[in-house]
Amino acid sequence: MKSFNAAAQQVSSFFAPTKTARFQKNSVFKRKLLSHFIGSVLAAGVAVPELALAQESSKQTFSLEAVVVTARNREEIAQKVPLPVSVVGGKTLDRDNVVSVNDLVKKVPNLGVFGSNPRQTSISLRGIGKNAANDTMEPSVGVIVDGVVSSYVGQSWNDFIDLDRIEVIRGPQGTLLGKNTTLGVVNIVTKGPSFKPGYSYEVRYGEYNELGGKVSGTGAIVDDLIAYRGSIFFNKKDGVLDNTWQSGPETWNETNRVGGRLQFLVTPDETLSARIILDSIQSVENGNKSLLVDNGPSTFADGETRATTFFSRLQRDYFNNADGTKYQPVFKGGEFGDNKIEDSQARPQRTEQGGVSVELKKILSDEYSLTSITAYREQHFDIKNGGVTRFDIGNGGQQLWNDQTSQEFRLNYKGDKNYDYQVGLYYLDAEVYSDDPTYYGADAAAFNASNAQWNSLKAPKYRGLLTDAQRGVYRSYVLNPTTESYAAFGQVNWHFTEKATLTLGLRDTYENKDGRNRRELDRAGTALTNATGSDNSKAINYGLDLTNTADLAAWNAAKALYRSAIGTGSAGDKGIYDWIEGDSISDNSIAWLVSPSYQLTNDVLVYASLSSGEKSGAVEFDSDSASATYGQPLNVKPEKAENVELGFKSLLLDRRLLINANLYYTQLTDYQSNLTVIDRSQEPEVLRSYLGNIPGVTAKGIEFETAFAVAPGLNINLSGAYNRATYDEFFTTLPDISATKLADYSGKQLHGAPKVTLAYGLDYTYQLSDGYGLNFFLSNAYRSAAYLQPSQSEYTLQKAYNVTDGGVALDRANGKYRISFIVKNLFDEHYKTGGNTYSGTNAVTEQPGYGRAFSFSFRSNF
């Protein structure tokens, strides 16, 4: 044991916390803890997830436990379901504190979750589906919580409590699930009420001032008639960025959430049950900030000199410190974890969301059962993004409201051994109201001015004019899309023999979509130019004589800056307009599934599937201010997917070894995405960004899951994917060059799509005396290199990285309590969750992930 401890001391000294302000305190104590942790791991062995042992005796038979899923709207053993579905069970979710879809990424290969707030959230499967910050397009990957589909993907950006399991189902969906999707579904299942009393609570404390708690209780209100389940939580953790502008400590990209759920189960008789769920969550968080990394090179990638940069603008004789010296923006520090920003304008983002659902289940006979799910959900999101300096340059953000009402009916038949089926109806009524404001501060014009405009306005004589050129302007872009969706769906399983089954599914969806947009000038600022008053009458207020060449140049520069701020700089009076109705969409789409499967043995299943899905188009508008059709309808076409799967599921070695694998080929036509192209109708040519369609995208690869019950109490697991997600046909602009130039991206890997993703680990429980046990666990998530932005600039490349989590816990065998010591990002891996390249006004930025962090938790069940 001494040799193990000595080795552990050497390892822990190598991985000692970085000497930053955040980690300096108690560093000796933490190194000792890490030393003992690694020593225990080396001495005892470690292990991971959910695949706990089913033991008849501690020294006799043992095997992997069966995992139950509801991917097909019925409880089934996961190994018997001919679908590529990954399941993360409640034990792993609790152990690793997985409470959000963002946390799920480390557990499920080929899954991506992107975004720093609800509106920026997007979920991808197999490298496809990353479409954040749009309010009109449906998600390609759906999210379902207790049978209720989230029509707006941002509703998934929160913490979930009382989790039973999370299922990730790949491929087009809709022949069984509520809403049609083209790529897959994340199905979140929570624990329901029980007539058997049960209570639990958990407290968590850790680095980054992490403090969290959960309380849950269930039991009977009226025996055998009404049961309840109530749950509340709070989750608070400092962010990875320190804002140096504030006199007191203030961190950004933090977590600060509180919420609760109240459920009732009513069972009037053995054939009828009603589950009622009410939930609410609120958050007030400092978020959505990026770290300034670098000003970028002095020349573009094509060798041309960068005439105007983020840093050069701040070097103008305007942005000075109080003592008159030149202002220096706060860039990323030299050490990992030295993440300082300076922002005088940022404000917390606020999110409020909740809803109610009623699920009725009626057993009609031995063969038939009927399910009805009625639900209403709403969300309000408000954010002020702030800036990146101490100066009052500007602010932006989002005020967003979305709500939805849905109704689903399902009839299930299972009375004949030769076939069973489900049929259903689905209705959705959803609306989004999005207000995207832009505010200009007193220092805006000095920063936004071109070099020529600055030269005309930089003289002290024009300082008042420079300040007023954009100060106080507040304008908004308002978007109001609505959706009504009607669908009929069904799926039948034909059992030709006891081993051979053919599954056929069909869905018909009809949707009405409308939308409108407007651009408002909420506050006009100083109004240097408009229909009221002449230039001379306004200029004289600044002591200007417009017959003077210098005064006239300064006045014209200020007017141009003002027009740019109010949105009429390049499109005349079209920059501000009242409601413009969109081109309504009334469309019908078909989804289908053909899936044969064969049970080779009781523990080996082979399957194949051919499926097709579609999500409807979007009522959109021309957002190019230089366009003659600015603000006019510009719809997005439907996105269509065709998918082929070939896979097997197996349990070997007396069900101690699980091996599942599947090959897939997915082809999307008219993939909906944010596009940046060259507008050749303008002179000179300009870049144009809008929501549109990429002609084709293909994903192909292999996914696998393995788990092995090595010995009683010891499990190991390995899951992974190799994924080639590429553009079939796509021309877009090259990044980081001086002139607009199209490049052929056909054959290139999509951004946010690492080719290789792995999740592996170990979980070992050592039984002590008197019903106690020590649980050691270790898990690792690996992602190969991938670009974080569509431009695929070298500055947005995230290199391959691993994030390793682990811990040790003391358990009571009866589950009465558990004390855990946990470390996240054990090896202090530096990685980023977002980033952007440089431009004429922006520096290179990144959003760093968390460094190594220790925490303790205590959970009790009684």
Image: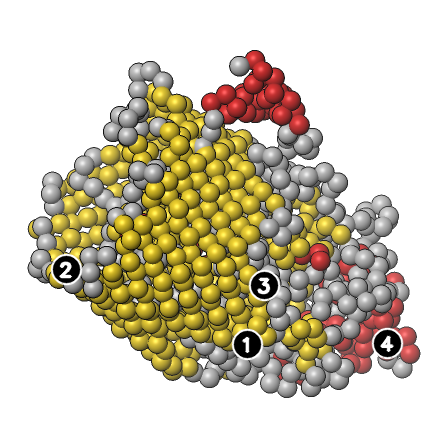
Q: Nearer the viewer, mark 2 or mark 1?
A: 2
Q: What number is the disc on residue 11? A: none
Q: Earlier in the sequence, mark 2 or mark 1?
A: 2
Q: Earlier in the sequence, mark 3 or mark 2?
A: 2
Badge 1 crowding class, 10 Å Cα cut-off, few under 14, some 14 to 19, many 20 or more, is: some
Whole-number angstrom distance, CA of label 1 to CA of label 4: 47 Å
- Residue at coordinates 57% horizontally, 79% vertically from top-left? 622
Q: What number is the disc on residue 750? A: 3
Label 3 secondary element? loop
Q: Earlier in the sequence, mark 1 or mark 4?
A: 4
Q: Amino acid at mark 2?
A: Lys
Q: Amino acid at mark 4?
A: Ala
Viewer-proximal residue, 740 or 571?
740
Pick the quarter of the image with the C terminus: top left
Badge 4 crowding class, 10 Å Cα cut-off, few under 14, some 14 to 19, many 20 or more, is: some
> Circle 1 sits on which residue?
695
> Circle 2 sits on which residue?
417
Report x, y in % for residue 47.
45, 32
Whole-number angstrom distance, CA of label 1 to CA of label 3: 14 Å
- Residue at coordinates 30% horizontally, 72% vertically from top-left? 507
Q: Amino acid at mark 1?
A: Pro
- Position of residue 21 relative to residue 383, above or below, is above
Which quadrant of the figure has residue 310?
bottom right
Whole-number angstrom distance, CA of label 2 to CA of label 4: 87 Å
Report x, y in % for residue 12.
62, 25
Instruction: Tell me: 578 left or right of 503.
Output: right
Q: Nearer the viewer, mark 2 or mark 4?
A: 2
User: Are circles 2 and 1 on residues that touch, CB within 8 Å?
Assistant: no
Whole-number angstrom distance, CA of label 3 to CA of label 2: 45 Å
